[in-house]
Amino acid sequence: MNLQMVLKRFSIITNIELDESSSWVTLCKDSVEEIKNHLRKGVDIEAHAHRLEVAAATLAFYKYTLYRASSPGMESFAAGEIRIKSDPGTSVKMAYRAWQEAKSSIVDLIEDDSFIFERIAF
């Protein structure tokens, strides 16, 4: 996976100029590593680079959205009769859905550790 391609896709998804997205390189790098850590043994990363880069950029976007939602900032704006209010919860839900969709596109390449099977005692 090419970190520069992940960063480029991340900047498109977040609508951040590429030169301004450099402060999020670490987040993108962490997302690349997280994807790599969940790959099945024997997966040819280069052969599937495009799908993996899209998934890593979307994971970075989800994490970015979580960080932005948890930091204090402008949540509403009013100018005369016009009022705009952002809802961090909705943004996080949308980013999570995007990540789940991207994850489903690489499900054949990753180990599925999303389920926990437990014994039910009667």
Image: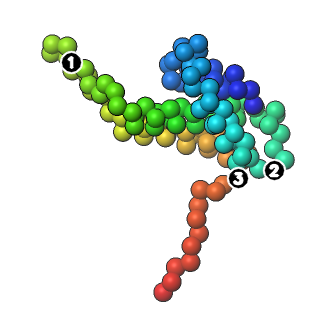
Instruction: Kindly state the secondary structure of the residue where label 2 is placed.
Output: loop
Figure check: 36 above or below 77: below
Residue identifier under label 3:
111
Amino acid type for the residue under numbered disc 1: Ala
Residue identifier under label 2:
41
Q: Is residue 90 visible?
A: no
Q: Position of residue 6 (x, y in %)?
A: 66, 26
Would you say 60 lies left or right of 35 here? left
Residue depicted at x 21% and y 18%: 78
Q: Is residue 36 visible?
A: yes
Separation of marks 3 and 1 at Cα, in angstroms: 47 Å
Separation of marks 2 and 1 at Cα, in angstroms: 53 Å
Figure check: 112 above or below 23: below
Marks 3 and 1, the one that precedes in the sequence? 1
Residues marked 3 and 1 touching at CB (< 8 Å): no
In this rendered view, identify the residue nearer to me: 32 or 82: 32
Residue depicted at x 36% and y 39%: 89
Q: Residues within 10 Å of mark 2 (few under 14, many from 20)?
A: few
Residue depicted at x 59% and y 56%: 114
Residues marked 2 and 1 touching at CB (< 8 Å): no
Instruction: Kindly state the secondary structure of the residue where label 3 is placed.
Output: loop
In this rendered view, identify the residue nearer to me: 117 or 101: 117
Amino acid type for the residue under numbered disc 3: Glu
Figure check: 88 above or below 8: below
Residue identifier under label 1:
78
Separation of marks 2 and 3 at Cα, in angstroms: 9 Å
Residue depicted at x 59% and y 69%: 117
In this rendered view, identify the residue nearer to me: 18 or 40: 18
